[in-house]
Image (cartoon, rainbow, N blue to C red):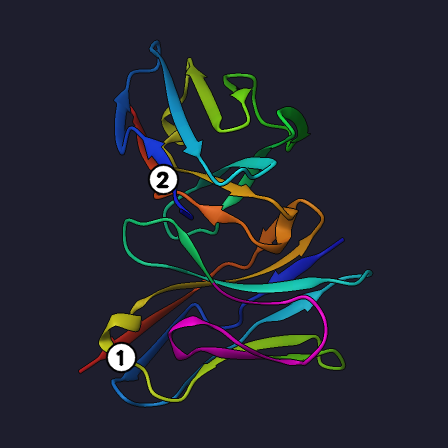
Amino acid sequence: AQSVTQLDSQVPVFEEAPVELRCNYSSSVSVYLFWYVQYPNQGLQLLLKYLSGSTLVKGINGFEAEFNKSQTSFHLRKPSVHISDTAEYFCAVGNTDKLIFGTGTRLQVFP
Amino acid sequence: DTEVTQTPKHLVMGMTNKKSLKCEQHMGHRAMYWYKQKAKKPPELMFVYSYEKLSINESVPSRFSPECPNSSLLNLHLHALQPEDSALYLCASSQNGAYEQYFGPGTRLTVT
């Protein structure tokens, strides 16, 4: 069975500050890991994904994530956030056709 | 074009109504998905169609009936819904399964 835990339900941060959104996963097989963003009243957009290879993954909008197999983590980072990054962020684990999402982290960026 | 479109954007229906949600993609993707998302919760997978055949049904009640008429179109037929079925219904498509799914904007359904 696979599962994802997002440890923080909300992360408040000031504009231009760095941010880290935490994600831990559990799986008995090889996994593929994803971060999706959902802006208010919209669908989900893929930020980045880890399938194999380099453990540091760069995505859109300046986000990056690091896959850490020993700690079963896939934390999302951005060195300097903007107001427009305010959204819900979902970590997900996938295998074949199924995506299993974490409970989400609400990133709130303040001016 | 990486767009998945969904209609209608909003839908209000009574518990005795029959309605349908529609999803279209023109990316040539072989798989299409329906998800249900309650407020402040993650999306939950409902159905997966692969090459126009139902491949996954996550034990969804029969009042939800999916249909895939062709490779570009996915419908979700609704009948005798309950107020607790009110949610955002998201459609997604993918050529490579879970590896990269493209989501539509969703249909916000309210059951009265």
Disc 2 is placed on an element classified as: loop
- Residue type at numbered disc 2: Gly
Q: Choose between B90 and B61: the one closer to the eye.
A: B90
Residue A40 at x, y percent in the picture? 28, 55
- Residue type at numbered disc 1: His
Q: Is residue B87 left or right of residue A67?
A: left
What residue is disc 1 on?
A82
- In magenta stretch: residue A17: no
Q: Is residue B2 left or right of residue B47?
A: left
**Residue B83 numbered mark, or none:** none
What residue is disc 2 on?
B106
Q: Dot 1, how many residues are within 10 Å of its Cα: few (below 14), some (14-19), or many (20+)? A: some
- In magenta stretch: residue A62: yes
Residue A80 at x, y percent in the picture? 34, 87
Q: Choose between A21 and B96: the one closer to the eye.
A: B96
Disc 1 is placed on an element classified as: loop
Separation of marks 1 and 2 at Cα, in angstroms: 26 Å
